[in-house]
Image (tube, rainbow, N blue to C red):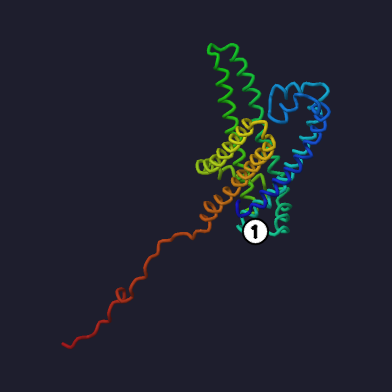
Amino acid sequence: MWHYQRVLWFIFIINLVLGHFGAGATSHKLDGVLDHSLHSQRVSGMFDYGSFSALASNPEVKLFEVAGVSISFSLVFFAIVFFLTGGILEAYRSGRRLTTREFFEACGSYFWRWVRLFILMMIVVAPVLALPQVIWERAETLTGNALQEKTGFWLLVSGMGAVILLLMCIRLWFDMAQVRAVVDEETAMWRNAGHAFKLTFRNFRSLFWMYLRISLLGWALLAVGLYIWAKMPPARSQWTFLILELVVLCGFGTRLWQRACEMIWYQRRVLAAIAAPAQFSVVPPTNPLLTIAPPQTDTPL
């Protein structure tokens, strides 16, 4: 990932540009309200939830009416990264610096395969995404009716943790399906998903531990960045943008690191086993001097 880090910077710059345009509509709405307001420092210099909640409920601001602009730019960013995934995996597979032409050729070559995989993944993920609502309703019921007042809370925590774990497993499964499609040039995505399912859960311990360690590092960096941002005094508010962008950059870096590790794991564990020559027991040739009887000569009487 570090050797091919220009992909990381390319994605980061795209995110920065789209984020600027996505925040433009909200900034325009806030200008008319906060320019002469005493609450502006509590929103721009720091993050005060009470001030933000009051601002969001202000009928003059109507923040939620412009939220669709940010969502639209988020979907554009998702589509761009979705398209670039084929080139990224091809670069990790080849182990060399691809030219710009080779990179975007790989992006276009695998794009429709990713679309078919994404449809299949949505079919698998849809029931899992319905679980949080069920867990939330059950937790609310237990909070009001259970003998132990924290029963609903612990059900909510454990249920959401199980949902997150399940979503991570599904994501790892389809990550390996993409890796197989690039390495093995698989075109039948439904069959590819089935083979990737067997591969993932047959080697679940090593694969998930590799995936989880990088995820934990990414979550730790996110927590540290948000903690520094929340505790930063208002006098240094000009640094908050830099800190949050570093958090975003680390998030992209950990994700690309995961994809590189998945590719290397597949090449080392699977392709190495396929390429290894079969071991046959070699029988040493017999010595002909020991197997051919010596000629018998007539001895004189």
Measured as percent of width and height from the top left, residue 194 is found at 61, 43
Nearer to us in this view, 106 or 181: 106
Figure disc tally: 1
Looking at the image, which residue is at 61% across and 18% down?
A: 138
Q: Quadrant of residue 20?
A: top right
Would you name the residue on which mark 1 appears?
97
Looking at the image, which residue is at 73% across and 54% down?
A: 104
Mark 1 crowd level (few <14, some 14–19, many ≥20, 10 Å Cα):
few
Q: Residue furthest bottom?
A: 300
Measured as percent of width and height from the top left, residue 108 is found at 74, 52
* Quarter of the rendering occupied by the C terminus: bottom left
Looking at the image, which residue is at 66% across and 44% down?
A: 190
Nearer to us in this view, 222 or 99: 222
Q: Residue furthest left?
A: 301
Q: Quadrant of residue 286?
A: bottom left
Left or right: 62 as drawn, with respect to 203: right
Measured as percent of width and height from the top left, residue 187 is found at 68, 51
Q: Quadrant of residue 151?
A: top right
184 w.r.t. 245: above or below: below
- Residue type, numbered disc 1: Arg
Nearer to us in this view, 65 or 44: 44
Nearer to us in this view, 174 or 190: 174
Mark 1 residue element? loop
Measured as percent of width and height from the top left, residue 174 is found at 63, 42
